[in-house]
Amino acid sequence: MDTIVIGAGIGGIAVAGRLRRAGHNVTVVEKADHPGGRADFIQKDGYRFDTGPSLFLMPEVFAETYEALGERMQDHLELVRLDPTYRAHFHDGTRLDLTYQMPRMREQLDALEPGAFGQFLKFMAEGYSNYHLGLDKFVGRNFYSLAEYFDLRNLPLLLKMKALVTHASNTKRYFKDSRLQAAFSFQNMYLGLSPYEAPATFSLLQYTELGDGVWFPKGGMYRPIESMAQIAEGLGVRFEYGTAVRQINVEGSRASGVTLEDGKIMRADLVVANADLPYVYSDLLPDDGTAARLHRKKYTSSALMFYWGVKGAKAPELLHHNVFLADDEYRASFERIFEDLSLPQTPSFYVNAPARTDPSFAPENGDALMVLVPVGHINAAEPQDWAGLRERARSFVIERLEGIGVKDLGSRIVLEETMGPPDYLKKLNLAKGAAFGLSHNFTQIGYLRPHNRHPRYKNLYFAGASTHPGTGLPIVLLSAKLTAERIMQEVGQEKSVRSNLAQPVVLQHERHE
Ligand SMILES: Cc1cc2nc3c(=O)[nH]c(=O)nc-3n(C[C@H](O)[C@H](O)[C@H](O)COP(=O)(O)OP(=O)(O)OC[C@H]3O[C@@H](n4cnc5c(N)ncnc54)[C@H](O)[C@@H]3O)c2cc1C
């Protein structure tokens, strides 16, 4: 079976490898000159930056993908477990190091709010339950009908997982202190969501971080991309880089292949689109009204990204992962992003400083900082002044970092690269420049999320962040798995790609203070 995969993001690579193993003749066409999509890197003047994902979560899902491709994760990734996972800096100068060391957690949490440690344990227990129920019953499976999704057995589970309660209001039930409410809900920002809209089910994020761990693949977040692409290539997948698809060709109820930007036509028995799903409907397929419906859906935030090569000593105030929380204006800041589609007056933001774990990221007397400032996605009706917003975010972050002791940061930046919503739109074809794709509010998850097969063109499938189950590297790997499984079921290949989640692998532990 001749199969074309459009896009070599992590979802495209994984689905291509799985289908190749099942006997398909797979070609991946990717507009960029290398794989990765949002999970890219910059290497310049002795500095290295992961441009997108920086948090390696749910290692068992990565391990399962390597296994499905016939390899072992530990032969390709050297994973280091980070402890503390993050440092959260609050606006009043206090901070919280999230750590697996329970006595230290107790000491810190109870100092911020007496009794908070006990509440934290209950919160984690709920996150643990949400994680396992969510993965087994909702995230890790395909839904083929609404009745199946709202099955009588599933409804009580949706309620148990608090799918109809917001993450922010749920966090409030556990913690009175606004700093802790922020510290246990900001993780939604990593999925481009507002905790005031995201279902409380997402407390599973805090569980994964502290329960299963935050990991770092030595060499950086591009390691999984390049190793999976190499494995897929070794299996016989053909990657054609610098090859943009202009349209998906359709005949009746089938996709017959693609037309490339240069006019070349490639025929196929099956097409899998890894490019952002709303963009595929609006730009690559004939208009049937779906694109306009998708346009009206909720989208995740975008991000103003800064990649700074800094000369001089590495600031001890920063750990590998750092968040700066505007807890005095926490709620308002999300309204600015998700309602006004702009930049908050006092933005919360994230700083990634991986040279503390992997010295190859920066010269000996230097530091490599990646800064993510969440911002609204593109508003076509009232275009934003991105240069102005970027300048404001830049000054704010530098001032805030200098305020916690990162001395003379502004004058020590010797290399600067940036990315923002227009880049996500133009470079990566992400609808509205929304960095994380379609949002994950209750009406856009599970069966209610755009499906991984086109309703009319029965041999056109989707794998990636804007289809089921959603965004984030491990979740997109699950998307690739579910799409490959569905293809296997529907086109009836002789060889199955099904495989159970791999047994937990032995991972290397390291501690970072
Ligand atoms: C700033 C940022 C931080 C993030 N942080 C994390 C994190 O810490 N942890 C985490 O797990 N996840 C994180 N994510 C999310 C994660 O990066 C994404 O969910 C994931 O990479 C999406 O993969 P994908 O395969 O669905 O899509 P993509 O990576 O977008 O890949 C799609 C590919 O399709 C190609 N393409 C598009 N149009 C065409 C066309 N017409 N022809 C040919 N090719 C085309 C694109 O060039 C791209 O390579 C982050 C994302 C961003 C942007």
Image (cartoon, rainbow, N blue to C red):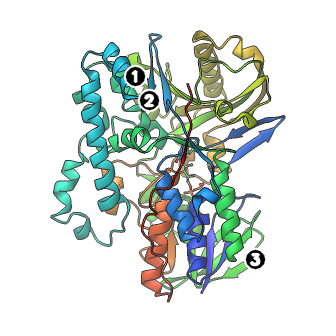
Would you place residue 288 above or below residue 297 in this image? Answer: below
Would residue 428 be seen by someone viewing this image from the given angle?
Answer: no
> Mark 2 to mark 1: distance in Å?
7 Å
As shown in the figure, which amino acid type bears the numbered disc 2?
Thr
Circle 1 is placed at which residue position? 104
- Between disc 3 and disc 2, whose residue precedes? 2
Circle 3 is placed at which residue position? 264
> Mark 3 to mark 1: distance in Å?
61 Å
Image position of 402 (left or right of 441): right
* Label 3 lies in ligand 1 vicinity (Cβ under 8 Å): no
- Horizontal and vertical percent for residue 145? 29, 71
**Residue under the point 20% across and 55% down:** 157
Would residue 269 be seen by someone viewing this image from the given angle?
Answer: yes
Res 99 label: 2
Q: Residues within 10 Å of mark 1 (few under 14, many from 20)?
A: few
Verify CB contact (< 8 Å) between mark 2 and mark 1.
yes
Q: Nearer the viewer, residue 251 or 390?
A: 390
Determine the secondary structure under disc 1: helix
As shown in the figure, which amino acid type bears the numbered disc 1?
Arg
